[in-house]
Image (tube, rainbow, N blue to C red):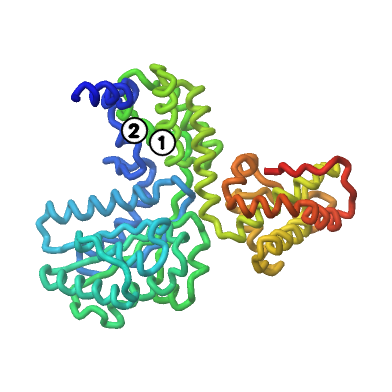
Amino acid sequence: MIDKIRVPYTRFFDPASPIIACEHLLNSRYVPDTVIARDEQMEVIGHNLSAILRQGEPSNMYIWGDTGVGKTITVKYLLRILTEGLKAEDKDILIDTVVIDCTAFSSEIPACVEILTQLTGISMQTGRQFYQYLNDIWSIIDKKAHEHTFYTLILFFDEIDAFVSPDNILYQFSRALAHQKIKSSNVAIEIITASNQKDFLATLNNKVQSSARFRYCDFPDYNDKELYEILQLRKDAFADGVISDDVILYCAKNVADRYHGDARRAIDILAEAARIVIQTKGSKITNEHIDMAEKVVNDRVTIDMLKRMSLHDKYLILSVYIANNVVKQTNSKTPAHSGVIVVTYRKICELLQQKPNGETYISTRLTTLSARQLINAEYREGRGNIRYITLPNDIETVIETLFQIQDIETIKNNYTDVESIVLSKLKRPLARSTKLDFF
């Protein structure tokens, strides 16, 4: 019986890999003992949080920077240093830090349930109203404040832009002390928000902006040298001799040049390269493995990013794809312009029985999608104030993952109607036969 288990176990599972020695170092949740190239940001955040040591109330913070520039790791690192430092100095100041991943807890009640779960260590149940969860949180704060000279609750809303309608929850926590929801006076509540959208704060209600008064902290992109140092901190994840410094530098330079210094992507590429080597029974990670891993990671990141988009942003992406597909059939080298995208979008909404947004809103969304590099929008010399719009190649290759099969079939079955709308706007005939297999 033991052999019946041991034989398939040793065949399919490999506890000792010749490639990876310490896999957790490649995990996105791993926080290293050293944070690279973020001294200036840590000084700003640390100076602000120092008010807690004086039993004062720090300013709420808004941390902005592109994906993978160290926002989350830096905040988690500083909060760990702060709490451990207080313990070492034996000060009767208790700090509870609650990290809320807004991609997972994207509305008020799930976020409050997560806050209570982290504060109590007990898994909380849903099914109650928002104010009831808030009252439980206020009670816990009061209880902890009575047990210590000073108590601070730090709420870190990571990727706050993924939170659906965050105004109310931010307002409630930013005004809890002023509205005397908490009886104790030896309390501070600190809100830290992080986003890759520079202008996210402008989307909040004016009342929330006034109440929270977020202090801004900017995280710039990593350059290739900084990325190289970051990846060197993860080198111990691999067995000796598996990856050279030259390969690490190659990965760092590629990511710095092509992906605005996204450290998270660089680490994922190293991890994926290791998996490729293991699958192919190789012994070393080479530049070729990095290139192969980059393609895998890039597709995965693109799909994840697109799936988190709103439904109508997906329709706009699809409209750009279809409109340019029709343009190619006319043998034109000029991409579809924004007017073509608008009529295509409206037709898609009609076919899928969705109410379309107005033209002003569409124009704003196209600007936003362009800023996020999800579409390419350009003005061409001599053609006036018209934007010509295309899709990046990496978006085109995964576009079919955005939609349900029945929606794809509906559009395919009515493709000639969509095509006619585009051609009418373009005022030109087809030069080649229609392609229905556009997915």
The answer to whether residue 11 of the structure is visible from this angle is yes
Q: Are marks 1 and 2 in contact (CB under 8 Å)?
A: yes
In the rendered image, residue 435, in percent from the top left (x then y), is placed at 77, 42
Say what amino acid the circle numbered 2 marks: Arg
Residue 236 at x, y = what percent? Answer: 30, 28
Q: Quadrant of residue 243?
A: top left
Vertical order, 275 against 226 (above or below): above
Q: Position of residue 386 (x, y in %)?
A: 78, 56
Q: Position of residue 35 (x, y in %)?
A: 33, 42
Label 2, secondary structure: give it.
loop
Residue 234 shows which numbered tag?
2
Reply above or below: 357 against 38: below
Frontmost residue, 6 versus 107: 6
The quadrant of the picture occupied by the C terminus is top right
Give the residue displayed 77% in from the left and 55% down from the top.
Answer: 418
Is 413 in front, or is 122? Answer: 413
For image coordinates 35% across by 75% down, the residue present is 172
> Residue under circle 1?
267
Quadrant of residue 154 in the image? bottom left
